[in-house]
Image: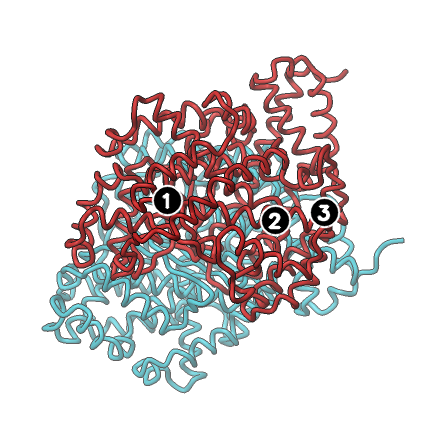
Chain colours: A cyan, B red
Amino acid sequence: MPDDPQTLYQSVCQQAVDIARLESAEALLGWDELTKMPAAGAEHRAEQMKLLSGIIHQRWTNPRLAEQLAILAESPLVAEPHADTAVNIRRLKRKVDRLTKLPQSLVEELAQTASLGQHVWRKARAEDDFAAFRPVLEKTFSLKRQQADAFGYDECRYDALLDDYEPDERTANVGRVLAELRERLVPLVAAIAQSERRPNSALLQQEFPIERQQRFGRRLSAAIGFDYSRGRLDETAHPFCTGLGPNDCRITTRYDARSFGSALFGTLHESGHGIYDQGTPTEHYGLPLGETISLGIHESQSRLWENLIGRSRPFWQCFYGEVQEAFPEALAQTPFEEFFFAINEVRPSLIRVEADEATYNLHILVRFELEQALLDDDLPVADLPGAWREKYAHYLGIEPPSDTDGVLQDVHWSAGMVGYFPTYALGNLYAAQFFAQADADLGGLEPMLARGEFHPLREWLRENIHRHGQRYSAAELVERVTGKPLSSAALIEHLRAKLGPLYGA
Amino acid sequence: MPDDPQTLYQSVCQQAVDIARLESAEALLGWDELTKMPAAGAEHRAEQMKLLSGIIHQRWTNPRLAEQLAILAESPLVAEPHADTAVNIRRLKRKVDRLTKLPQSLVEELAQTASLGQHVWRKARAEDDFAAFRPVLEKTFSLKRQQADAFGYDECRYDALLDDYEPDERTANVGRVLAELRERLVPLVAAIAQSERRPNSALLQQEFPIERQQRFGRRLSAAIGFDYSRGRLDETAHPFCTGLGPNDCRITTRYDARSFGSALFGTLHESGHGIYDQGTPTEHYGLPLGETISLGIHESQSRLWENLIGRSRPFWQCFYGEVQEAFPEALAQTPFEEFFFAINEVRPSLIRVEADEATYNLHILVRFELEQALLDDDLPVADLPGAWREKYAHYLGIEPPSDTDGVLQDVHWSAGMVGYFPTYALGNLYAAQFFAQADADLGGLEPMLARGEFHPLREWLRENIHRHGQRYSAAELVERVTGKPLSSAALIEHLRAKLGPLYGA
């Protein structure tokens, strides 16, 4: 006699929660490797992670789990699409279906090529040698085509890959919003580039003793609401945030004694990710209802705290006095306006990860357009460096003098991450749209921020976004929360409102 | 057609290495819990570890593995008992046989009772309430009897449990050596207690700034040979050493700004464990040939560096100048002899973990005798506190005023660890016997130590002990290395030679 749906559902949930526990053990192995592990431990760590991810993959692709989910997907438990049971069943089924669609041989070839690709890329970037990288990049895109075809898609191949990072999102929709953004952003950036006003950015490159940076960064991240009783902050070469359990979220940053902003804005950014992670409902841990929605929504939370709050006038009205006390040698004599202009400098530059709030999205646009062309075979890999330079010239008005500072700068493609880039820009767009709505709902955030009161905004985010886990897709959520579909209006308005007065542009 | 033995052997080794990788992942979860994890992560961590140890237990007790080992144990691969294949087969079979001898229900009851026991013990110790602890301790010993009977034994029940910590060792042999030790130690300790000479131990309880302790402890541990490129040192409430992989060994210590010795001798102790772990052959990782022999041999390595080296005259002749420079406020005016006497104070005391080099073994003797009596039902648990006081009076000449400072001081019994205590004393005995042999083989260690040359001794340990993994049992090894079976002679001689002149005893 078959189990009744409720019993089956409980069994499926138990399996998913157990897998989440194993995945979080693997995540700890990864965190430790980047933060604490002696370098000599790397080889063993790779073996441990391979073994553990094999066990995890085996559990996800256990045919019994797929069968149980197929039965549940036809049961009364999915009648109400936003009910707990329906959400968990739908999202789990989706995940299992995707994982089981890929033949084992393709999974292995993708993993091997990603590992080789990163190795080759690292060397090619160091030596400014795109030709050396080309063969493995061709192989990567050929495999990604096969992967997309195995997943299947309605409109275009890119959809199938985008779905790994931004579930339910469509390439056409992202393209539409980013084109809209580009149209308004390119002239704004060009006007700023022609402005005679220039901030004194050198004042952010003085001596900022690391120990005081650590104290101040920790102070601000706690102030905006990263909960250190359920998380911690460490130092790594590349900052990240990783959730290791329902009450254990770890963020990292990097310190540069000659930079005011690098660690600080990085800490605010990762704290934003962490606050989202800490805001998901712990009672649903290991199930879709306890998980974050997409990379785009995740990024919206980090960008909101880093940029919309962390580079805002009221935020620094609140904290600039403390900054001057913490770094008197560097900033005691610097007027507020000068500091504020410096942290909001806009300048077209070559490197994405160092880009400012406005030009950042143009860097993404370049990559989004190029990776679609590569995937569709419209652009031969051999022509990629030229196409890259052309787009930079067109959108940002500058051209990289080398591939190292051009097409070789990012790790993503070498690691097989195709479809990832647009989530950064989606994050910026969502952030601005959510922030505008919170501002309206809470009757004006400015005075609260100027008083250092972040609690109302954090609760608004928790209530409207975090606590829902994956109950809604990103598109559903943004409509539900802001009453409008995703658009570039809020971001453009935010940038104009802040940058216009600074640059007179 | 059955596999040939070589193929079977390879398959068994692969299974064992994979299990070791999972065990080391679990070890990382444990290390992280004690060193880095936010406290709120504890519940999830417990679930992760339970799941992972279930997977590990399942693999060890997979009937196919037992069958394969049974075939191998009859194959030509075991003809030469100390050959690689024979050692790995014998030790793996032993492990699998022991694990499969326990019924699942008993394994679960033991785990539950250990968990409950520690919880109850913690409260009972805090409230000096042995009566509250008594029921769960009775249950524990009843289960340990069942466990011993399930394992089986030739001579006595205690043998079956001792074997978990000191494989192949016999209770009768340990009893003989410890009785011999007691006979010579009790009068020595009594003579010291009656001596008029007393060190000025207060000089070790001045202000020793923690940051300088950290630097100095790290300096000494690196000097004796703990390899920081393959390991790290962190801070925890209770110091420990854990091997997380062939090139990743982690030690911890605790700092007390009012104690010279607590962190420093703790660091030397854990470094000794770490040097052993780092000295096992990495090419045999995950197999018996790549693993340490027993807790007794492990403890011999930590005690050797902590006591035989770390409290020796030549060691401090080498480093006392540096100590005075590091802590000038506390020690600049203190003559060497005064410092040296203070770090070698002998004084009967109530608490095992604070005991000195000489009286420590009497603390162990009390526990070893009592746990045997409890296991054999010769001593009702209700009578344990009285028996404890009696033995302390008899062996150490003092009586605990409370059970908190008496029978409730150690966690071991509450956690079901019966048969563990004697390995501490065995460690002291092995350490002295190995040290005497190294001294003879290397033509006198004193001048080397006084010059801070630890390399010859470390290489001697590596060559004679570490590199063999589990090729020999502890008893075989000590005979092989020193030409004699384990005895108390070397330890007594060491203590007399050092303490006699200090105390005129």
Q: Label 2: which residue? A: B417
Q: Mark 3 packing: few (<14 Cα in 10 Å), some, or many (20+)?
A: some
Q: Secondary structure at mark 3?
A: loop
Q: Label 1: which residue? A: B232
Identify which amino acid the numbered label 1 is placed on. Answer: Arg
Q: Label 3: which residue? A: B376
Decide which of tag 3 and tag 2 comes sooner along the chain: 3
Decide which of tag 1 and tag 2 comes sooner along the chain: 1
Q: Chain of mark 1?
A: B
Q: Chain of mark 2?
A: B
Does B24 appear above or below A283?
Answer: above
Please provide percent x and percent y for residue B70: 73, 24
Q: Confirm whether circles 1 and 3 share one chain.
A: yes
Q: CA distance from mark 3 to mark 2?
A: 16 Å
Q: In the visual, does B409 lie left or right of A318?
A: right
Please provide percent x and percent y for residue B353: 45, 53
Q: Is residue A422 visible?
A: no
Q: Residue at x 19, y 51 (%)?
A: B326
Asked if the residues shown at circle 3 and circle 2 are in contact, with their CB atoms under 8 angstroms apart, the answer is: no
